[in-house]
Image (spheres, helix red, strand yellow):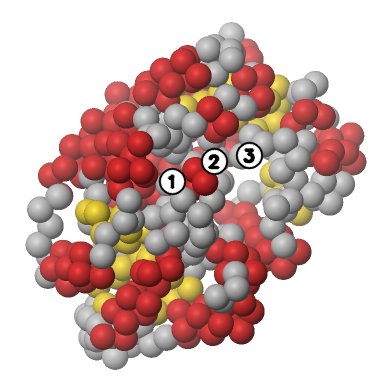
């Protein structure tokens, strides 16, 4: 959800901005998840050299810092443990927001939310997203500014660090990411329960191809909490499952940032909404696990459908195996041209260069003229 790495770097270099990053746990998560995520974020920002702190008293921070502008990663009311951080309580500041993932759908509840309508600046990834806002949002997209997808800047950069586990046995392995969504049961509009039939296949493939394949398990942050309360899983089975991936000879558990993980990979399989666009920035093969592709695409915007169409569809054990054995391990990749065309047509905005620079330039011109 953190999309402001390059923006912060440019703001600090500019000299006209005093920047603070406040780490506030997401209210919907368990106490353990909130502590884990806060500590991970703090380590990330310390490694980046950015001024960040875990905040348990936002009102005090605001009183001492006197912010003129607040950039929010989450648009929903009551998202944070500290209610003083709620954007509705901070409308005396300029509110800036970029969607926490690349929007693929046209759900009104996702597009027409109060912050999107009332923010000073609402930065979107493409003209398609601006057009959707103009149709669906109450403010008709009046504050929508097209800048591109912020992660594009990071994908253009050289790999900074390799998060993939080093296996020193002299064998060459392809690196595959498996990224399942948290919806292991029906959640209405988020009906993606394909984890229930695909998890065992992924375990089997990890064992069968231990000498040729390395798999990074990159679950949605909420997957574990959903498994813990699910009657078919529960604490013991869930912990054993996570331990399988964390401790396997050719497997690893990844719960942090994904950009460097993506860069160092050879392919991915997933059923996560935002990754449908984000992984395409790598140019590498990607498969989407679903037994109901038409339902997935039914509520997508034109941007989402184009990204989905650049994926291999994995709707059975045989199709998952074929993708991994034929495309990932064998190198037979007939969808390569489709991915490259999608990347150039709707994802990259080469005419504008850096996405963070486009965002900062708009802020500066609006503030300073």
Q: Which of 148/43 is in front?
A: 148
Q: Residue furthest top?
A: 369
Q: CA distance from mark 3 to mark 2?
A: 6 Å
Res. 291 image quadrant: bottom left
Residue, x 24% and y 42% (percent of image)? 309
The residue lying toward the viewer, choosing from 140 and 22, is: 140
* Quarter of the picture holding the C terminus: top right
Tag on residue 74?
A: 3
Secondary element under disc 1, as helix, strand or loop, is loop
Is residue 84 visible in this depiction of the protein?
yes
Sequence-first tag of 3 and 2: 3
* Position of residue 35 measured from the top left corner of the image (x, y, whole percent): 73, 64
Disc 3 vs disc 2: Cβ atoms closer than 8 Å?
yes
Kindly check if marks 2 and 1 are in contact, taking CB atoms under 8 A apart as contact: yes
Q: Can residue 364 be spotted in the picture?
A: no
Answer with mark 2 or mark 1, whichever residue precedes in sequence.
Answer: 2
Is 125 situated left or right of 28 in this image?
A: left
Q: Which mark is residue 274?
A: 1
Q: Mark 3: which secondary structure?
A: loop
Q: Is residue 265 left or right of residue 230?
A: left
**Which residue is the site of mark 2?**
100
């Amino acid at each position: 959800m953190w999309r402001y790495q390059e923006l912060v770097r440019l703001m600090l270099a500019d000299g006209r901005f005093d920047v603070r990053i406040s780490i506030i746990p997401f209210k919907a998560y368990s106490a353990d998840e909130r502590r884990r995520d806060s500590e991970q974020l703090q380590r990330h920002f310390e490694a980046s050299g950015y001024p960040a702190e875990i905040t348990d008293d936002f009102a005090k921070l605001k009183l001492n810092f006197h912010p003129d502008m607040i950039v929010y990663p989450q648009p929903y009311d009551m998202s944070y443990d500290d209610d003083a951080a709620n954007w509705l309580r901070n409308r005396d500041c300029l509110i800036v927001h970029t969607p926490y993932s690349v929007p693929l759908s046209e759900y009104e509840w996702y597009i027409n939310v109060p912050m999107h309508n009332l923010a000073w600046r609402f930065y979107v990834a493409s003209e398609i997203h601006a057009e959707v806002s103009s149709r669906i949002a109450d403010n008709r997209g009046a504050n929508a500014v097209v800048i591109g997808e912020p992660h594009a800047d990071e994908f253009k950069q050289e790999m900074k660090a390799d998060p993939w586990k080093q296996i020193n046995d002299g064998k060459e392995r392809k690196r595959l990411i498996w990224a399942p969504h948290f919806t292991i049961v029906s959640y209405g509009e988020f009906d993606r329960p394909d984890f229930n039939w695909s998890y065992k296949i992924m375990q089997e493939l990890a064992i069968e191809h231990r000498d040729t394949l390395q798999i990074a398990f990159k679950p949605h942050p909420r997957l574990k909490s959903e498994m813990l309360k699910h009657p078919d899983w529960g604490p013991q089975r869930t912990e054993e499952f996570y331990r399988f991936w964390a401790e396997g000879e050719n497997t690893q558990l990844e719960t942090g940032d994904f950009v460097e993980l993506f860069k160092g990979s050879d392919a991915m399989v997933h059923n996560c909404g935002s990754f449908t666009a984000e992984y395409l920035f790598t140019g590498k093969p990607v498969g989407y696990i679903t037994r109901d592709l038409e339902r997935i695409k039914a509520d997508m915007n034109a941007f989402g459908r184009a990204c989905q169409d650049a994926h291999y569809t994995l709707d059975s054990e045989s199709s998952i195996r074929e993708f991994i054995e034929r495309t990932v391990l064998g190198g037979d990749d007939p969808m390569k041209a489709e991915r490259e065309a999608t990347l150039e047509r709707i994802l990259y905005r080469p005419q504008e260069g850096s996405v963070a620079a486009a965002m900062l330039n708009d802020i500066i011109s609006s503030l300073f003229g």
